[in-house]
Structures are given as C-alpha cells and as structure tokens.
C-alpha cells in the first residue's frame, strides 16, 4: 500500500554550502508522485537564492516506477539554469535499475551513496 508523500525534512549538509538534501519516501508511484512534485519544487523555491545543488536521496526508496522517473525529470527541467540536481540510489536497488532502464542517468547524475553525491 502506498501512503501519501511524507519526505523527510530537507537538510543542508555542512560539507557543501548551498546544497539541500531531500530524502524521498519508501515508494514513489502513481499514488504519490503527483503530490511529491510540489513538495520538492517548494523546497527548491524556498531556498532559491542560495540553492546550488538539490540532492534527491532515494536510498530509503524500495519501489519506484515510471512516475518516479517523471518526477525527477520534471525537477531537473524546473531547476535547469538555477541549480543542479543530483540523485542518490543504492546500486542494486529498484530505483537505480529504473533510472538506468529509463535512460534518465544520461541527463541526471546518479550516485551510489550520499557521501559521493556531496563530494562531487
């Protein structure tokens, strides 16, 4: 069963100024992707003047379908020019495979863990 979106509070890691990490829910599908988009975009808008990098953390996400790909793609296009997007997905996870199969990895950098995404 998929519940309404409840991403964790955005946090700004001290390792990279202007970077916001947003952990996404355990499932991203047709039931919640539509509600997640405004939450992610409002986070970006609220930090617009100082946001350089938005990291979408999918490490706790165990299911994602094409709606998740659409969500990431829409955020990528929304941020184009003002900030960069990075995605974190465990290497053998469903989100990682979905991102690979969809071809979105060509446009959006995907990292195996949060530390790599913040160092990059």
Image (cartoon, grey):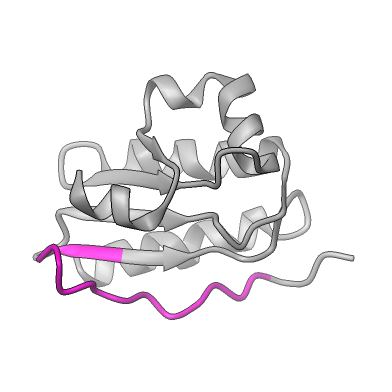
Which residue sits at x=49%, y=25%?
A: 104
Residue positioned 35% across, 34% down in the render: 109
Q: Locate residue 59: give its quadrant.
A: bottom right
In the image, is residue 109 above or below residue 44? above
Residue 89 position, x and y percent, is 52, 46
On screen, residue 105 versus residue 10, left or right, reads right
For the record, the magenta segment spans 5-20
11 relative to 38, above or below: below
Judge whether residue 18 is colored magenta.
yes
- 115 or 56: which is nearer to us? 115
Q: Could you tell me which residue is drawn at 41 percent across and 46 percent down?
A: 87
Q: Quadrant of the N terminus?
A: bottom right
Image coordinates for residue 45, horizontal then vertical, percent:
27, 64
In the shown orientation, is residue 103 left or right of residue 67? left
In the image, taking residue 73 as reference, residue 6 lies left or right, namely right
Q: Residue furthest right?
A: 1
Q: Is residue 92 above or below residue 41?
A: above
Q: Nearer the viewer, residue 78 or 87?
A: 87
Residue 103 on the magenta segment: no
Q: In the picture, which quadrant includes the C terminus?
A: top left
Residue at horizontal 9 percent and vertical 66 percent from the top: 17
Locate residue 41: give its quadrant: bottom left
Question: x%, y% of residue 94?
Answer: 70, 41
Along the viewing direction, whichever of 119 and 23 lies nearer the viewer: 119
* Majority SS type along the magenta span: loop
Q: How many numbered callouts?
A: 0
Q: 40 or 18: nearer the eye?
A: 18
């Amino acid at each position: 069963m998929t519940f309404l979106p409840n991403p964790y509070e955005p946090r700004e890691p001290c390792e990279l100024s202007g970077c916001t990490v947003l952990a996404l829910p355990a499932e991203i599908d047709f039931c919640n992707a539509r509600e997640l988009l405004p939450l992610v975009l409002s986070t970006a808008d609220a930090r617009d003047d100082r946001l350089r990098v938005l990291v979408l953390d999918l490490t706790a996400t165990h299911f994602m379908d094409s709606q998740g790909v659409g969500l990431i793609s829409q955020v990528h296009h929304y941020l184009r020019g003002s900030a960069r997007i990075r995605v974190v997905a465990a290497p053998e996870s469903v989100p990682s495979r979905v991102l690979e199969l969809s071809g979105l990895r060509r446009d959006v950098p995907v990292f195996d863990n949060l530390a790599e995404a913040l160092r990059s």
